[in-house]
């Protein structure tokens, strides 16, 4: 699998305090946690706690290796009820809320489609699913609202529901990490889970700065300063994808058609400080990506996102006015499409 980190951390600067950083490979991507303003022992202890929690979440939420999620999916498929852990219940509830807001374009219940397209694997090989099988899975119409939870027991009214939190877990983990770091007395940190990033506090006397990856080349297309509690998320067609007959197929599936979304290279959203900022930064980019050039702005509004950027398949950048005022482009193209 080709690994591309979507955002890069710029750590130059302050001489009074050092930034302590650790990197691990979790959630199928590179994870970085950086802490500023603490001594090494305190920073390492706080980061280690976060990394352990991430590893636990990765195991519990895995979509195709034995996990709490696969056990729940088996119960759904068999029409059975199953006890659900409180942490997983919270994830299901939050994902359902965001799915409703997206009018079903963000839908973690379509794991059967994701599997059919070969994206429930560590490596992606070109596949060409039977159109009839795609049609069948779409008509089964699995959605998060099919899941009911009563007194800690979950069941699905639709046996076609197969949960896959690949488009949500990283953002949810940002919120978890932020709470843990606050509890450990860390006021200044940057959490980066494969390009889903949250900033806490600042880096000395200036904000944390990140770069947004060029989807079709090396380096960053833009830089951005993050305020305390802000989260940024990017979805692209260049992380998890395969090429078949000269056409690119990415892991972002349109639940309406059953096919990978086309016409967009990347979407980036910036979410203000809030209880679910990390989760929203991960989930919101998917319906915007799926909606494409014609519908991306409306999809952003539906998700309550003011700051959004879309790069279409021709390389043209479309951006909201408020985000354009925050971001610094390495090279600002004359054809930039700025919308309210």
Image (cartoon, grey):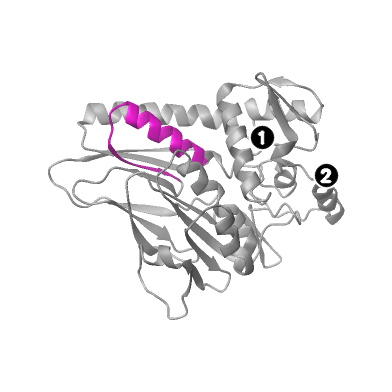
Q: CA distance from mark 2 to mark 1?
A: 20 Å
* Residue depicted at 45% across the width and 33% down the height: 176
Q: Residues within 10 Å of mark 1 (few under 14, many from 20)?
A: some
Let me know if residue 240 appears in the view.
no
Q: Earlier in the sequence, mark 2 or mark 1?
A: 1
Mark linked to residue 64: 1
Q: Quadrant of residue 241?
A: bottom right
- Left or right side of 9 for 162: right
Q: Quadrant of residue 174?
A: top left
- Percent x, y for residue 157? 80, 32
Which of 141 and 297 lies nearest the eye of the viewer? 297
Instruction: Return the residue at label 2.
Output: 140
Callout 1: SS: loop
Find out whether the residues at labels 2 and 1 contact each other: C-beta distance under 8 Å: no
Q: Mark 2 or mark 1: which is in front?
A: 2
Residue 73 highlighted magenta (yes or no) = no
Which of 182 and 245 lies nearest the eye of the viewer? 182
Callout 2: SS: helix
Residue 190 drawn above or below residue 186: below
- Percent x, y for residue 331? 37, 73
Q: Which residues are magenta?
A: 170-193
- Left or right side of 229 for 132: right
Q: Looking at the image, which residue sits at the far bottom?
A: 334
* Residue depicted at 32% across the width and 50% down the height: 227
Which of 176 and 47 lies nearest the eye of the viewer? 176
Q: Residues within 10 Å of mark 2 (few under 14, many from 20)?
A: few
Residue 171 highlighted magenta (yes or no) = yes
- Percent x, y for residue 194? 46, 46
Which of 95 and 114 lies nearest the eye of the viewer? 95
Let me know if residue 217 appears in the view.
yes
């Amino acid at each position: 699998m080709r690994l591309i980190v979507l955002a890069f951390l710029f750590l130059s600067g302050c001489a009074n305090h050092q930034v302590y950083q650790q990197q691990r490979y979790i959630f199928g991507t590179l994870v970085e946690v950086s802490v500023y303003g603490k001594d090494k022992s305190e920073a390492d202890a706080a980061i280690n706690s976060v990394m352990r929690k991430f590893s636990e979440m990765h195991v519990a939420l895995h979509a195709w290796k034995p996990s709490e999620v696969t056990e729940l999916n088996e119960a759904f498929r068999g029409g059975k009820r199953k006890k659900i852990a409180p942490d997983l219940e919270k994830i299901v509830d939050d994902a359902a809320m965001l799915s409703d807001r997206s009018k079903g374009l963000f839908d973690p219940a379509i794991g059967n489609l994701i599997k059919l397209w070969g994206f429930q694997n560590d490596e992606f090989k070109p596949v060409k699913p039977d159109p009839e099988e795609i049609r069948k899975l779409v008509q089964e119409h699995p959605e998060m609202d099919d899941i009911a939870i009563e007194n800690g027991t979950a069941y699905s009214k639709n046996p076609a529901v197969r949960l896959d939190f690949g488009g949500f877990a990283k953002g949810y983990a940002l919120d978890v990490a932020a709470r843990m770091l606050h509890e450990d007395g860390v006021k200044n940190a940057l959490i980066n889970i494969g390009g889903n990033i949250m900033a806490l506090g600042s880096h000395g006397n200036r904000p944390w700065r990140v770069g947004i990856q060029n989807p079709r080349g090396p380096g960053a297309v833009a830089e951005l300063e993050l305020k305390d509690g802000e989260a940024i998320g990017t979805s692209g067609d260049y992380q998890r994808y395969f090429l078949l007959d000269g056409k690119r197929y990415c892991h972002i599936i349109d639940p309406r058609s059953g096919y990978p979304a086309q016409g967009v290279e990347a979407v980036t959203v910036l979410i203000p400080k809030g209880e679910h900022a990390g989760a929203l930064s991960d989930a919101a980019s998917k319906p915007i990506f799926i909606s494409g050039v014609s519908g991306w702005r409306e999809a952003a509004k539906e998700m309550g996102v003011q700051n959004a950027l879309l790069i279409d398949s021709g390389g043209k950048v479309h951006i909201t006015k408020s985000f354009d005022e925050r971001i610094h482009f390495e090279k600002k193209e004359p054809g930039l499409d700025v919308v309210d």
